[in-house]
Image: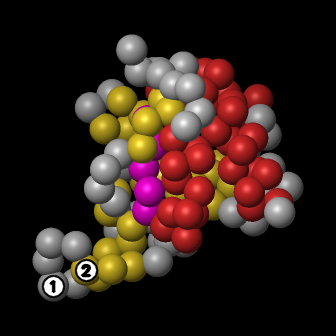
Amino acid sequence: MAIKENDIVNVLTKLECRTNFSIKKITEYMLPKLKEAFYLHIENQMPHIIIRPVFEVFAAELAAIEGVTKREAYFHSAEMTRFPKRVNKGINEIHYGISFKFENSKAVTLFIKKLITIVGG
């Protein structure tokens, strides 16, 4: 069973991830003490976290965390303004990233801590 939106928000708050803005079903967060953005998107009441495509080389490592699942395709959204763009289905470029789903709070905690380690070097 997947984690619920308020549970994932509580974990992100506890880990001191700060919120920048919310538009529609997407919220931009920053990792604590780092200038690395990621996004929380709610799709059919199922939350998932999207990270920049530059982290593709770490995707398997992040997905290996128990309770974490990487979605096969890139996630596209015009609201993810800190991410790069590419052409998806239309003729215009759109922002995109790597999407992960979570089963529980522990998986989110381990994922964010691993991401902090990766970004922090």
Would you say 90 lies left or right of 21 here? Answer: left
- The N terminus is located in which quarter? top left
Q: Going 69% across and 63% down the picture, which residue do you hit?
A: 36
User: Which of 95/98 is in front?
Assistant: 98
- Look at the picture and state if 79 lies above or below 101: below
- Look at the picture and state if 53 lies above or below 48: below
Location of residue 8 by image quarter: top right
Q: At which x and y percent is residue 88?
A: 22, 73
Q: At which x and y percent is residue 90?
A: 14, 77
Q: Going 33% across and 80% down the picture, which residue do you hit?
A: 86
Location of residue 37 by image quarter: bottom right
Labels 2 and 1 touching (C-beta < 8 A):
yes
Residue type at mark 2? Val
Specify the color scheme.
Answer: secondary structure
| Name of the residue lying farthest toward the top | 1
Residue type at mark 1? Ile
Q: Secondary structure at mark 1?
A: loop
User: Which of 20/63 is in front?
Assistant: 63
- Look at the picture and state if 97 lies above or below 83: above
Residue 98 counted in the magenta span: yes
- State whether residue 40 appears in this view: no
Q: At which x and y percent is residue 101?
A: 43, 35
Would you say 13 lies left or right of 38 here? Answer: right
Q: Going 47% across and 22% down the picture, which residue do you hit?
A: 103
> In whole angstroms, how far apart are the C-alphas of marks 2 and 1?
6 Å
Badge 1 density bin: few <14, some 14–19, many ≥20, Cα 10 Å: few
Residue 87 is marked as 2
Span shown in magenta: 97-101
Q: Label 1 belongs to which residue?
A: 91
- State whether residue 32 appears in this view: yes
* Total tally of numbered discs in the picture: 2
